[in-house]
Structures are given as C-alpha cells and as structure tokens.
Image (cartoon, rainbow, N blue to C red):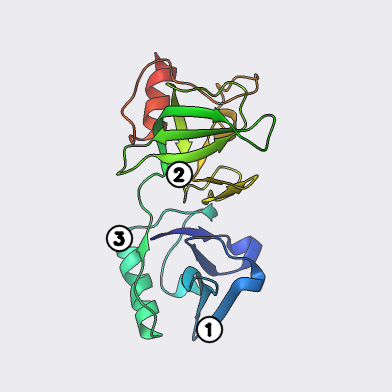
Amino acid sequence: MKFNTFYNSNGIGDVLLLSSGQGHRDDVAIQTKGSVTQLKRVSDDTIVGYNIQSISDYLTIEGAGHVTLTEQDEAVINQLLSEQGFEPISLRFESALVVGYVTSCRDHEDSDHLHVTTVNVGGERDLQVVCGAPNIDAEQTVIVATPGTVMPNGVEIYTGELRGVKSEGMICSLRELGIKQASTERGIYVFNKAYQPGMSAMAAIKEELEQ
C-alpha cells in the first residue's frame, strides 16, 4: 500500500495529507498523537490516511495540491510517524497512469451505456474496469488511471463499484488529463499503435503526439 501526498497551505493550512484509500466518515476512526492524525477504516481495519500538522517545520514542500516528495522526505515522515508510535509507510513515487491493453469488453448487465472491460496493465493480473465511453472496445491500447492516480482536477482514483460491478481504475480521454491536443469528440483516447502495457502513459502520449 502506497500513499499519495497532498499539500495546500493557502487552502487548508500547513498540513501534509497522506492518502491511500477512501473511507466514509461514518466508518473512519481518528487517532491523534502529537502533530500526527491517523485515519483508519473501521470495517476492515485499513489505514486510509495521515494528516501531519506544521509540516513545514520538518520539510520544504513546493507547489500545491498533489505534490511529489522524495525518498529523503519519506524518511523524515516515517521518523515523525515512528515518534508517535505509528508504523512506517511508503509514498507513491511512480506514475499510476499507465498504458493498458483491453483484452475483453462486454455490456454492463445493469446499464444501457456502461461496459465491463478486462485490461492488461503489465501487472501480475489484469484489472476489471467499468467504462462508459461510447468508443471502448476489445483489442485497444488505452490510457488507464490505476487506483492511486490523482487526476488533474484533484480527484483520486480508487477501486469501487459502478452499478454493482467492481471497477479497478478508469480508462481516460486526453481531455480528462488536461492535454491541449485533446479531441472535442466524446470518448476515451485510443493509441494508434501498440505500446507495452504498464509503461508510463504520459511517455506514450508524448511520443505519439509528437509524431
């Protein structure tokens, strides 16, 4: 389990937010020790986040919103957690936006527009992703926001359900990624050639758009 990092001193103050999953407010237990607050999902005893107050006393963070930290920053954060009796964590450094290959696509049984796809993203197993794009089909090479991806609008992608069917990510359009060359037509972006599943989607997009 890896944590995404968020910081916005103007919006919420000098607090570093660490997030690894969703938790409904009625299902989250909060424990504060010193400057560290732990958020744990009660239903399955999973830690979904930490908030660290006065983080600028320990780290220099540039930017706002979803921020990328370093391994040295991770060591400082784990020292703070350990001092308060919490277990160390791992931060997400790598991109969670990857190239995927759609191995199967079927109609959702409880929807007139959703599709249930199976997508190879280069991992140990394929992901099941529910997609509402009109142009989705099998044997396409696509952009996949895997769980943990933070979209340009600040929304974090989690594993969830759409109309009762598990969905482990999101198949994206260029517009959803804020890319200027995005088509105005509705639908996901389909690569013109095959790229290796699991490789950085942004690298593949850059290569394709420059051709």
Neighbor class of circle 2 (other Cα within 10 Å; few <14, some 14-19, many 20+) is many
- Amino acid on which disc 3 is placed: Glu
- Quadrant of residue 175 within the rendered picture: top right
Of the image marks 1 and 3, the number of the one nearer the N terminus: 1
Looking at the rendered structure, which numbered label has been put on residue 146? 2
CA separation, marks 1 and 2? 30 Å
Q: Position of residue 191 (x, y in %)?
A: 44, 20
Secondary structure beneath disc 3?
helix
At label 2, which amino acid type do we have? Thr
Q: Which residue occupies 57% across, 79% down?
A: 30
Q: Mark 1 sits on what residue?
A: 32
Structural distance between the alpha carbons of marks 2 and 3 = 22 Å
- The residue to which callout 3 is attached is 71
Q: Earlier in the sequence, mark 1 or mark 2?
A: 1
x%, y% of residue 6?
A: 52, 59
Residue drawn at (54%, 69%) of the image: 15
Left or right of 101 on screen, residue 7: right
Q: Nearer the viewer, mark 1 or mark 2?
A: 2
